[in-house]
Structures are given as structure tokens and as C-alpha cells.
Image (cartoon, grey):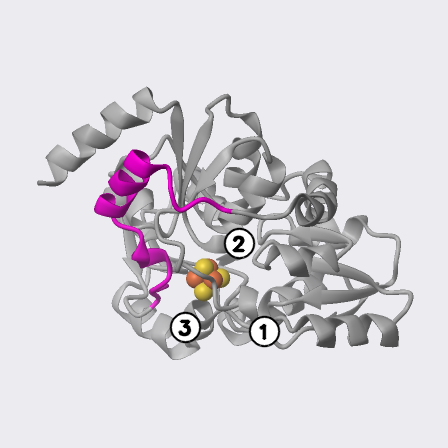
Amino acid sequence: MDREIKSKIKELKKKNNTIILVHNYQIPEVQDIADFVGDSLDLAMKATKTDAENIIFCGVDFMAESAKILNPSKNVIIPDIEAECPMANMVNLNDLKKLKNDHPGAEVVAYINTTAKTKILSDICCTSANGVKVVKSLLSEKIIFIPDKNLGSYIQRFAKDKEMILWPGICPTHHKIRKEDILTIKKKHPDAEILVHPECRPEVIDISDHTFSTNGMVNYAKTSDTKEFIIGTEKELCYRLKKENLDKTFYPLKSAICPNMKKITLEKVLNSLKTLEPRIKLSNEIMEKAKQPLQRMMEVGRGD
Ligand code: SF4
């Protein structure tokens, strides 16, 4: 059945001049039909370089929105319009406006995991790969960082000269990972290196060997001499890690699942290829304004 769907996807993709971009947290079957698999920064950059007329974005809403903002002339299609990121919805725009008024000299750094409307109120975006580089690149000494307090406090470790006001948001998937969960796996596999994502709690970051974005983990696993790794991020990254490193072993945190990323299935991708729906729709005004902080981030580039 899957084989049949995959072959139809391949056929329609070519016929419709479509590229399929897939986030590292998508289910294995969807990763397998991708033209490109990556983290949010990679995918945003890839979207700006494609000649394809249609982009099928297998990820969550804010990622597809970013692809649309950077490519307003293309059709950006998300196979399940209800695949939303709860963290992106943790910013109340009125509260953010008030915070900005209370700190007039502060620059607002928005994690890319924000809605287009939130980006409009921000000076620059960042991802988990380039957050430190972005914050260090700013002239302002005071930063309002939205919405992930864990990523913000991680960045603060490297940007000690900045006063960072952290929005109280979290990623439910990463915040669920406990120090004890990691230590239990480490006890069973004492030679494994611990790699965690900066969206994890500070005490989890403290016991890690390295803290990386998902692409940072992919790059490190390839070049490291270590053969075993405990992976402190959404569990599906282990599929890509194993596929690209057959001689190495990756231990996932089994409870680290993002239910929103799992809403996209092969059937839904096929349906989107047939209908070229559901499309991301944003007004020109929103796209133009939200593009500025994204473009400013792209000029800073990757940090890992
Ligand atoms: S893993 Fe966390 S930040 Fe990423 S989409 Fe899911 S809820 Fe949002």
C-alpha cells in the first residue's frame, strides 16, 4: 500500500512541478518521500532556492508560513492545516506590545517558531541553530526573547553581556524530557554521548555532552568517533540519524513525541499533490512585514 502511494507521489510531484520539504521530526514514511529533509532554518533556506512552482511543506504551520513569506509567488501547501505548533501560539500579541512599551530600547528576537503576526512585532528571527549568533550580532544590550524560555536561557549562557527578558513559553515535547529520563538511559549505555536540544530544560542541558539544533546533531553524529548516542529531542530524528550512520546506535527518549508533527501522513501528502491544497494564505501586508525579521536572520546565517 505504502509502495503504491509513494510511486503515485513521485509521479504527481514531477507532473505538478512540486518540491517536498520535510522536517526532521516527521514520521519515517514521510521522510522517505522528501526532496529535502532538514531543520526549520535549512527548510526556510531551501524554499528560497527552489525553481519548483509548488512547495509541499511537511512540518507545522509556522514553518510553512515562513516558506510562503520568503516565496510569495509560490504555492505553499501544508498537507494538514491543523498541524500547529503549540509554542508558536504561546505569544499573546497585546502582552508583547505592552512588554515592548515597557522596554523601549530592547530588540525583540523571535524564535522562528512564531506566527507571522508575532514576527511582525519582532526585529529579527532566530532558530535553535543560530540563536546565539543572532543575539550576539545585535547592538542593543537589552533583548526581549520570544517565545521559548529554555532556548532563551541557553542563549543567555553565551551572551552574558546582554540582558535577556524571556517570554514564559516552552515546547511541550522538549520540556517533558527530564534529567532522570536521560540518566536512566545513560546507566544502561554508559559509553553513549548525550546530545540534547536547546529547547530542553536547563538541568537537562547541564548533564548533556553537547547541545545542538537537530541539524547540529546530524552533523556531529556523522563526524564523531563515538558509536552510541542518547538523543534528547523529538524521537523521530533518530530515524534520520540511523539512516545516515548505519554503524552507530541512537537511543531516543521514547516519550519525546510532537503530536502535531505526526499529523502529516503519506495519504495526506498524496491528497495535497492531487488538489494542491490546503494552501498557506497570508495577506501581502503581513508577508511583507514578516519577511523583514526573517531576512535579517538569513543574513546572519547558520550558527552550527
Ligand atoms: S517539537 Fe515543540 S517546537 Fe517543534 S513543532 Fe512540536 S511543539 Fe512546536
| Foreground label between 3 and 2 | 2
Q: Earlier in the sequence, mark 1 or mark 2?
A: 2
Q: Earlier in the sequence, mark 3 or mark 2?
A: 2
User: Which residue lies most toward the right here?
Assistant: 105
Q: Position of residue 162 (x, y in %)?
A: 82, 64
Q: Which residue is mark 2?
A: 62
Is the residue at mark 1 in contact range of ligand 1, meaning its CB lies under 8 Å from it?
no
Residue 138 is tagged as none
- Give the magenta part as a residue range: 256-280
Q: Secondary structure at mark 3?
A: loop
In the rendered image, the quadrant that contains the N terminus is top left
Answer whether residue 130 is visible to the viewer in this image: yes
Q: Which residue is mark 3?
A: 177
Decide: few, some or many residues near mark 2? Use Cα within 10 Å; few <14, some 14-19, many ≥20.
many
Q: Position of residue 92 (x, y in %)?
A: 65, 73
Residue drawn at (39%, 28%), measured in percent from left and top? Answer: 18
In the rendered image, the quadrant that contains the C terminus is top right
Q: Amino acid at mark 3?
A: Ile
Q: Amino acid at mark 1?
A: Gly
Residue drawn at (29%, 58%), measured in percent from left and top? Answer: 251
Please tell me which residue lies in front, 245 or 190: 245
Residue 169 is tagged as 1
Please tell me which residue lies in front, 60 or 174: 60
Is the residue at mark 2 in contact range of ligand 1, meaning its CB lies under 8 Å from it?
yes
